[in-house]
Image: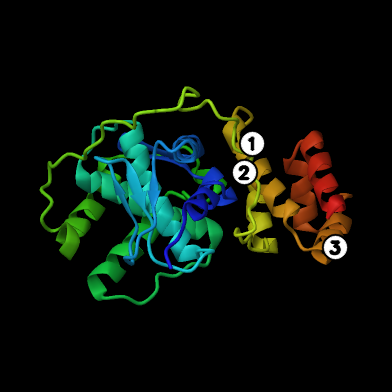
Amino acid sequence: MPLTQQDVLDTLNSYFVTQMDFWIDRVHVCARNYNSVRTLIENGDIPVAEGTASNAYYNPQTDVLTTQAGTPPPDLEDRALLVHECTHAIVDVEKYDITRLTNEVAAYVAQHTYLLLANPNYKVPPNNPPWFNFFNDVVALVKKFKLHQPAGRGAVLGWDDYKSLRTELNSLNIYSHVTDRERSFANGVPVSSDRGRFGSPPVSFRSSSHEVYPEASDESIMKLLEVRYAAKDVAGFGGRIATLEQMFSHMEKVRAKALLLRLQTRIAGDKMSVYFHDHLMGASRTKLLNLLRLR
């Protein structure tokens, strides 16, 4: 049974996609660009075909995204593969002039950033050695630049950062025929709707019934709270608060109550409590505490 258009939309509407923000060459992997792809799918400008193969595929010449075989709702690996293909769609929509190898590297990095956002303890499953090694190197790059963490938002990866992945990818069977300078086909996606590319209401990014939110660990909360951002680092402050809001909004009721008791007053000796009060602004603390109360 193939995955459906709704599975693609649910993936693009997931919280983890909203947290992605980095550049590889000219490719901007970010929520805004995924939202553009999502709108084009909803309006029928990027048709979604239900495929029967093990891999999904975006065809930039026909603007058709073909899903992979699977049983809805898709699991984490399947959702990450859809993110991979939607990254290729971004390249086409935005008409990025890049090589095919860079296009593929960007998609694989986006795929594994999504996996690590959803599961910070993600490990590459056993595979034949060339692919296993390549995937591990992609994961290492994501972790090096903290693309799956607030600290890595807005990261810009230059040629020296990803060129080794291009070489690795070029040695793998399905990419061995791609020449080093071969360009990606990216001519944009014609819009049939008079609403335009960004005419639909902004996506709410609310969880769908298919989305699974991992319970935030004390360690992950501590890592967010302990960072001291420069006074002018608005993106850093905003990214941390957005991530904490999602963590607190999806926290199990009993744990949320316990955390509320721990954070509502500054408890000397409790690093989490101290960082919460010393590193966050009053308005942010109030909003986060109210989210815990609502659980």
**Is 124 drawn above or below residue 209 in the view shown?**
below
Q: Write down the residue under mark 2.
A: 205
Q: Amino acid at mark 1?
A: Gly
Question: Please, what is the three-letter code of the amino acid marked with disc 2?
Answer: Phe
Q: Nearer the viewer, residue 137 or 66?
A: 66
Q: Please provide percent x and percent y for residue 232.
A: 60, 27
The residue shown at (27%, 50%) is 104
Closer to the observer: label 3 or label 2?
A: 2
Which of the two marks, 2 or 1, is nearer to us in this view? 2
Q: Earlier in the sequence, mark 3 or mark 2?
A: 2
Q: Quadrant of the C terminus?
A: bottom right
The answer to whether residue 46 is visible is yes
Residue drawn at point x = 29 percent, y = 33 percent: 96
Which one is in front, 61 or 170?
61
- Residue 165 rendering spot, x and y as whole percentages: 25, 54
Task: Give the distance between the C-alpha atoms of the residues marked 2 and 1, in whole angstroms.
Answer: 17 Å
Residue 156, x across and y down, in percent: 38, 38
